[in-house]
């Protein structure tokens, strides 16, 4: 599978949030719905990396899918479609790749909102001392609330540091039940 430079079929315009964590290559999206799905890829523990707009070669044709995703159990080509749920015509053609079709209406709203909130801080870096302090506290206590974690950060902006540790998979929080708040529980991530 080839990962192209910015393709000519897509107008390069920003879709928010701008930051990504596990993307490889140029980050260009067809629309905001595709960007929203990419936010979920960045917080999915099974995703190793993802590419935007990969070129899929089959017979004498070349098509662009929305994503090529490498997961712990293999690779998949993903297309994100709008509310009508109609797949692009080419997806019915066997191309030799695993294929997933994601319908915009099926994207979980709470998880998306939490992912977007976390990705706002993707460019921050946590100091070693703050990371070690938080991980040691979690080892000692088992879990802490977000509010309790904030007082542990001395050198890094607290919310930015905690978000970065979630995105870097040092700690985990529930992204599906409710929006991240002071009572959200933080646990050390164990493989």
Image: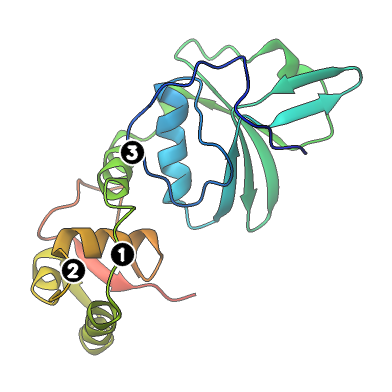
Work out whether 56 lies above or below 90.
below
Residue drawn where x is 32% and y is 36% of the image: 17
Work out whether 82 lies above or below 166.
above
Q: Nearer the viewer, mark 3 or mark 2?
A: 2
Residue identifier under label 1: 125
Say if mark 2 contacts mark 1, CB within 8 Å: yes
- Whole-number angstrom distance, CA of label 2 to CA of label 1: 8 Å
Where's residue 25, x and y in %? 59, 42
Residue drawn where x is 52% and y is 46% of the image: 23
Where's residue 41, x and y in %? 48, 45
Label 1 or label 3, whichever comes before in sequence order:
3
Residue at far right of view:
59
Q: Which mark is residue 156?
A: 2
Q: Secondary structure at mark 3?
A: helix
Where's residue 120, x and y in %? 27, 45
Work out whether 27 lies above or below 87.
below
Q: Nearer the viewer, mark 1 or mark 3?
A: 1
Q: Secondary structure at mark 2?
A: loop
Q: Which mark is residue 77?
A: none
> Dot 2: within a 10 Å radius of its alpha carbon, few (fewer than 14), some, or many (20 or more) residues?
some
- Whole-number angstrom distance, CA of label 1 to CA of label 3: 22 Å
Q: Quadrant of residue 146?
A: bottom left
Residue drawn where x is 84% and y is 34% of the image: 96
Residue drawn where x is 36% and y is 35% of the image: 108
Q: Quadrant of residue 13?
A: top left
Label 3 or label 2, whichever comes before in sequence order:
3
Residue identifier under label 3: 112
Say if mark 3 contacts mark 2, CB within 8 Å: no
């Amino acid at each position: 599978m080839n990962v192209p430079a910015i393709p000519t079929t897509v107008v390069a315009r920003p879709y928010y949030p701008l930051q990504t964590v596990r993307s490889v290559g140029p980050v260009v999206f067809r629309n905001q719905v595709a960007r929203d799905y990419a936010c979920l890829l960045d917080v999915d523990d099974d995703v190793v990396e993802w590419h935007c707009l990969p070129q899929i070669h089959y017979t004498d044709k070349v098509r662009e899918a929305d994503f090529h995703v490498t997961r712990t159990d293999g690779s998949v080509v993903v297309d994100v479609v709008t509310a009508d749920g109609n797949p692009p015509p080419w997806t019915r053609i066997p191309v030799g790749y695993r294929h997933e079709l994601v319908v915009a209406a099926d994207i979980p709203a709470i998880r998306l909102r939490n992912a977007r909130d976390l990705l706002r801080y993707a460019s921050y870096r946590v100091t070693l001392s703050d990371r070690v302090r938080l991980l040691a506290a979690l080892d000692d206590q088992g879990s802490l609330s977000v509010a309790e974690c904030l007082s542990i950060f001395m050198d890094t902006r607290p919310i930015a540091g905690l978000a970065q540790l979630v995105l870097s998979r040092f700690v985990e929080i529930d992204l599906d039940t409710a929006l991240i708040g002071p009572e959200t529980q933080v646990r050390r991530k164990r493989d």
